[in-house]
Image: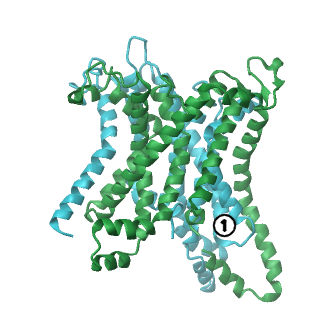
Chain colours: A green, B cyan
Amino acid sequence: MTTTVERTEAVAPVSSTSDKSRAERRLGWYLAGPAFAVMLLVTAYPIVQAVFDSLFDYRLTDPQNSAFVGLGNYGVILTDSVWWTSFGVTVLITVVTVAVELVLGFALALVMLNALRGLRPVLRTVILIPYAVITVVSAFAWQFAFSVDSGFVNAWFSFLGTTADTDWFGTQGSSLFVICLAEIWKTTPFISLLLLAGLAQVPDVLQEAAKVDGATWWQRMRRVTLPNMKAAIMVAVLFRTLDAFRVFDSVFVMTAGANNTETVSFLAYRQTIERVEIGLGSAVSVLLFLSVVLISVLFIKGFKVDLSQARGE
Amino acid sequence: MSTREKVGWGIGGLVIIVYCLFPVAWIVSLSFKSSDDIANGQFLPTVFSGANYEQILVGDAAGLFLPALVNSFGICLIATFVSCLLSMFAAYAIARLDFPGKKLILSTALAVAIFPVISIVTPLFNLWRQIGLYNTWPGLIIPYLSLTLPISIWTLSAFFREIPWEMEQAAQVDGATPWQAFRKVIVPLAAPGVFTTAIIAFFLAWNDFVYGISLTSTEAARPVPAALGLFSGASQFESPNGPIAAAAVIVTIPVVLLVLLFQRRIVAGLTNGAVKG
């Protein structure tokens, strides 16, 4: 709320304005500085270090033979089909989950907006449960439901042709299907809450006016509701896209990357932590980071997502 | 709204309730299945059995699960506390003071929030091994700040912007000392925001898996999600699914309790910082 600040400034006597504002600046940085420094320390420093490490052929088990290879690691990765498979899988998971979540989340938001007064608090409570459940727990729940040795899905959906031995985690397609289901279940509530907040901002007057003019429900939705909450939708999509692109937990738990279900995050993990190839792993991490930056730039420049809206200014 | 519409939206509401609770109900049901029941192909157990809980709380798996639970609580609470403390000062400055760099701080918070966690893990894995922070509590608390701090700054700034700060001056005009004005007027107004921020930050830390699994190697610091991910059963002949389900239920209880108690605040906190006209 900048108004408060402006008001205090206006009240201050003109002569001491520069002194006062200088003191205010200093105080501002004293107070906000530590948080700012910690944020830089835990992200900017590691990514710089990762860029540096990525230029070396460096394996933790063999530190003596560390050698500068320039962009060699990037060459190795970008010409390897393993990278492109994991990149493709990540893009697929991201596109599918975000698209489904947007539609489903919008439906949930509409129901929450229109549900009876008595039901609303109940809905807002249960909708937080998938959000609050740990991703790993959600991944296990879905994996166990579909698995051959402990699941019920095969028995329930036998009319669709599943048998007791249908192995959902035996092929790439069906594994990714279950991974996407788990991701969608867990994160749709967050999108729906953001969209609900956006829906609540659409002025009722506009809705009423359109109704009076004889617009159908669908017309009102397309011409009044959606354009008025475009900003909320874009912010929700941007956040979820970046989040989905980092998908790791569900893949680790459900398939551990088997049957070509490895995502970019998982590839970076496997190179660094399991194979202790610090150089190659760092290069994958840097490429993942660049992908995320690229997505953000595309959204902000291409779709004109106004993040000041997100900042609450 | 016509009766038909009301019924329609009501059914929609029921669908949402089933959608949200079904997988949770399933993992609870699975956790009560005996080892003979696990593969029965049914949703519910034929006999309710507490054997899985016994195994993780007092049995063979207790040595894995209980230390992990303590680690998770300790590490997440400390990370939440530190990020709330830091972001309280930052958010106060952002909401009340006029200084250059305000935008920079908020943009940085946004950038950190969307930062791919695994990109931080790679260099930290190497560095922590060199300086002895690998597999320790501080070794997780520090990177957890990258999860909790940005959201804390955003949520808290949004809350602090809405506080009527003039009331502080009003109280002083009425004869209160600055300290009294702060304690009796500002603290009660700011406390709910800080509290909500703490809950949301705690959720994020509690949910972490990447740091937990990459930066620890033993029970000394391994948090629950990582322990769950690595748990492979008492013996290779026994399916670990039952005990994992029981452990999953136990780690879900605290977050569900927080949701039930503070639903309204959490929704406000989540949407306040993100969407506002």
Label count reads: 1
Residue lying at 79% horizontally and 82% vertically, measured from the top left: A17
Tell me what residue is drawn at x 83 percent, y 23 percent.
A67
Location of the N terminus of chain B (image quadrant): bottom left
Mark 1 surroundings: few (<14), some (14-19) or many (≥20) residues within 10 A: many
Relative vertical location of residue A257 with respect to residue B107 in this rendering, above or below: above
Q: Nearer the viewer, residue A176 or B18?
A: A176
Task: Relative to A232, say whether B31 is above or below.
Answer: above
Q: Left or right: A209 with respect to B193?
A: left
Image check: A114 left or right of A169? left
Q: Which residue is mark 1?
A: B94
| Secondary structure state at the residue bearing disc 1 | helix
Check disc 1 and give the amino acid type. Answer: Ile
Taking depth in this image into account, of B19 and A90 the one nearest to the observer is A90
User: Which residue is rendered at x = 63% and y = 76% of the image?
Assistant: A2
In this picture, residue B272 sits left or right of residue B215:
left
Chain letter for mark 1, please.
Answer: B
Image spot of residue A190 (x, y percent): 44, 52
Q: Is residue A24 visible?
A: yes
Quarter residue A31 falls in: bottom right
Q: Residue furthest top?
A: B237
Residue closest to the eye, A100 or B153: A100
Depth check, front residue: B169 or A267: A267
Q: Position of residue A30 (x, y in %)?
A: 76, 62
Q: Is residue B82 visible?
A: no
* Residue at 68%, 67% in the rendered image: B93
